[in-house]
Amino acid sequence: MSHRLFLTFFLLCFAGSLLAQRSVSDAKIVYKVDLPPEQLQMDAMLEGSTLTQYMRGPLSRVDMDFNIVRYTYLINSKDETMTTLIDQHGTKYLIRAGKDQYEKDLKQYESVVFKDEAGSKEIAGYSCKKAIGTMADGKTFDVYYTPDLQPENRQYNRRFVNLKGLPLEFEIITKTGSKMKMVATKVELFPIPASYFDIPKTGYKEISQEELKKM
């Protein structure tokens, strides 16, 4: 193959790869939660739990619904703030994290290294690659991500700030060392209403991070 033909072939392949990728500003991703057997044995009500990720520009929202308790994380990467909402059987708490805490958490996840591994699968209609995430303390977790969807806001979920695409299956390491697996069941790319990211003005008791730890 001549140099000119090789260059043309290379550029066509490179352009095709770029065209396959889509920059994502707004999205809704619904994940089912696969909990460790020991957790389900302790509380069968946790079965059917879900995680829903919303993103809109610099705004992000994560809803973790464990049936008996619901956590909502409202993240603003522009202001570098995060608000946590907890709803446990109608008892509601609100915890604010300012810029200092935001930057501390971001720094923790910026050190996560993702390495592609052999393995792929289709999830929610997207072809996904396998990667292993290694945290600063040496703990690892599996991820399947699609390079076809590239989030505009890399900090929409700080856990994946270094990932080369959108995670559609991933593990979360719990405080006990066990792992929860999140598997995407639906990916919707449409404008998410700004109201989804509003911080409630009433209905929640505001507490500090220290009070939450004591609870």
Image: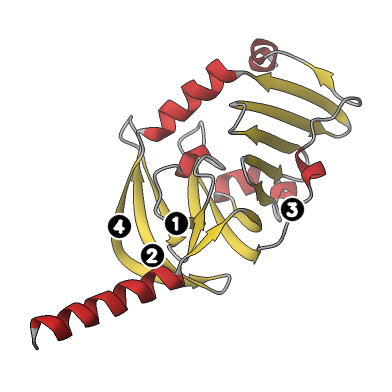
Q: If you read the primary sequence from the N terminus, does the residue marked by circle 2 or circle 3 appear first?
A: 2
- Residue that protrudes farthest toward the left in the picture: 2
Q: Which residue is mark 2?
A: 129
Choose the circle earlier in sequence order: 1 or 3.
Answer: 1
Q: Are marks 4 and 2 in contact (CB under 8 Å)?
A: yes
- In-front residue for pair 132/21: 21
SS class, disc 3: loop
What amino acid is labelled 2 in the image?
Answer: Lys
SS assignment at label 1: loop
Does the CB distance between marks 2 and 1 fall below 8 Å? Answer: yes
Q: Where residue 129 appears, x then y in whole percent?
A: 38, 65
Q: Residues within 10 Å of mark 3 (few under 14, many from 20)?
A: some
Q: Quadrant of the C terminus?
A: top right
- Residue under the point 27% across and 75% down: 11
Q: Amino acid at mark 1?
A: Gly
Measured in 3D between alpha carbons, the distance from the residue under mark 4 to the one under mark 2, in whole angstroms, is 7 Å
x%, y% of residue 57?
A: 63, 45
> Tag 1: Cα neighbours inside 10 Å, few (<14), some, or many (≥20)?
many
For this view, does 61 lie left or right of residue 202?
left
Closer to the camera, 114 or 69?
114
Rendered image: mark on residue 192:
3
Q: Which mark is residue 116?
A: 4
Identified by mark 4, the residue type is: Asp
Relative to 173, is 133 on the left or the right?
left
Spatial separation of the CA atoms under disc 4 and disc 3: 31 Å
Residue drawn at the location 56% of the way across and 59% of the way down: 183
Residue type of the residue flagged with mark 3: Ile
- Tag on residue 113? none
The residue to which callout 1 is attached is 165
x and y percent of residue 68 in the render?
Answer: 78, 40
